[in-house]
Every structure is written in structure tokens, then in C-alpha cells.
Amino acid sequence: ILANRIVWSLVFTTALLLALRRSSDVGKVLRDWKKMRFMLPAALTITINWGLYIWSVNAGHLLDASLGYYLNPLIAFAFGMLLFHEKCGALEWVALGLAVVGVLISTIAYGAFPWIAVGLATSFAVYGMLKKYAGVSGITSIAVETVLIAPFAIAFLIFSPLNAAVVSALTLKTGILLVLTGVVTATPMILFTRGVNSLPLTTVGFLQYISPTLQLLIGTLFFHEALTNERIVALVFFGVALVLYSIGMARRAKEPIASAAGE
């Protein structure tokens, strides 16, 4: 699945760049070491993240993956303040505190060190940080990443005995789903890259609470994983935190407008 996800993402982003007549952008980035010093580790980091996420979903750990993406905004929030010197108001700090409580409740309820959650959270937060440093536009950025890792994916698909066994049992439905992994992978990653480049990392972090909430709902409604009382309580904390952060963000957005009006 991971190898197909990489290859079909490359096909999809290449087609987009050709349609937009921007295929030369990839070569420019590949020749720019100032950007590539961030793009190379970003490609490696997102590959690790994708692999761990795919394994966790197929191994029945979707709720653990959901916890990981609840942890991720906290790390992104910290990166935004420590590395990019982004400022936050009182409401944002209260929101962060509530989110931390939610994460602690989920972690304690887990009953063991949540290595899946920590691995997903850390890898994706580091990936976002690297993308912000690189400053490459969405489509081009994903195309460059997949160009870097696609040779390894293609080699696996061609030479791995494991893949040969899977291909022999492949159905039309599964084949179509594998091809579509390129679209459903590249599209949100392109939008994520645009968001990282145009918004404060703290804002990007808190908006990412939407994704794990959807994962949690899918895990309980479609895959019938247990939704414990502790997870429900944690979800309430995350929801209140997101509302407070949104209010604080809206207030800060109005401050420059009010200042300009006063002048």
C-alpha cells in the first residue's frame, strides 16, 4: 500500500504540473540546495509517517492513530512558538492547556506507552516544520518528495516477492483503490503545504484537530473499535480547546483592522 501510495501520488502530481505547465518547477527545486536540505528529510519523514499510519489502520489501531493526530497539534504549536516566534494570546494558552488535559486523559486510558500515537504525532509535526522552512509551493513540494522516494517504491513493487504474491491475488476493486491512493494522498498534502506556507504553524496545528476527530468517528462507526468513556471525555476537552482557539484567532485577526480604522 505504501509503495503504491508513493507511485500514484507521483503520477497524480506530475499530471497536475503538466496540466498547469509548471513541470520545470520540480527541476528548479531539485537544483536548489537551500530548499533541498529541508525537502530531503521531509520526504523521509512523511514516508515514515505514511508507513506507520497504514500499518496502524490495517492492524486495527485507528483510534491509536487518532490519538497521534491529537498529539500532533501540540507539537506543532510548540514548534510555532519556539522556532518561528509566533505569538499567542490568553485564549490560545487556555486552549492549549485543555488540549494537553485531553491528551493526558487519552494517554492514561491507553494503559501503556502510546508509541503509535507518539510516532505519528512527532513525524508529522517535524514534517510540517521542514515544509515551512523549505517554503516550496504545494503541488511542486509533493512532486519533489515523491520523485525522491518513488525509485525505492518502484524497486519494491518490481523485485519484492511479497508484492508479487499480492499482485497475483489482486482484484479489479483493490487495483482501483490502490490507484486512487495517489489522489487521496496528494490532494490533502498539497493543501496542507499551502496552509503551512501561508498560515502560522500554531494555527495549522489547531486546525488539525479536525482530522483525528474524523478518524475517531470512522474507527468507531465503521470499524467498530471501542469508544471508551475516557476517550469521550478527552474529545470534549479537544472540542472546547478548538472553539476557544478559534475565538482567540478571530479576535487577533480583527486587531489589525481595528488599529487601521483608528488611524
Image (cartoon, rainbow, N blue to C red):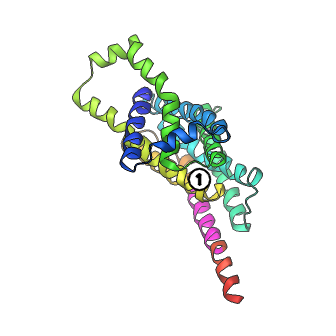
Quarter the N terminus occupies = top left
Region rendered in magenta: 238-251
Q: Residue at x 22, y 29 (%)?
A: 172
Q: Please give left or right for residue 22 compared with residue 237 in the image.
A: left
Residue at disc 1, secondary structure: helix
Quickly name the residue at label 1. 196
Q: How crowded is mark 1: few (under 14 residues within 10 Å), some or many (20 or more)?
A: many
Residue 100 vertical position relative to residue 8 in the rendered view, above or below: below
Percent coordinates x, y for residue 15 in the rendering: 36, 42
Residue 165 vertical position relative to residue 17 in the rendered view, above or below: above
Residue situated furthest bottom in the rendering: 262
Let me know if residue 128 is in the magenta part. Answer: no
Q: Please give left or right for residue 150 compared with residue 120 in the image.
A: left
Q: Please give left or right for residue 218 compared with residue 177 in the image.
A: right
Percent coordinates x, y for residue 33 in the rendering: 66, 37
Residue 138 vertical position relative to residue 145 in the rendered view, above or below: below
Quarter the C terminus occupies = bottom right
Q: Tally the marks.
A: 1
Residue situated furthest left in the rendering: 172
Q: Which of 232 and 138 is in front in this view?
A: 138
Percent coordinates x, y for residue 237 in the rendering: 60, 57
Q: Which amino acid does label 1 sit on?
A: Val
Residue 70 vertical position relative to residue 167 in the rendered view, above or below: below
Magenta segment's dominant SS is helix
Percent coordinates x, y for residue 143 in the rendering: 48, 39
Is residue 223 visible from the viewing direction of this image? Answer: no
Quadrant in which residue 160 is drawn: top left
Q: Which of 83 and 62 is in front in this view?
A: 83
Q: Which of 263 and 45 is in front in this view?
A: 263
Is residue 173 visible from the viewing direction of this image? Answer: yes
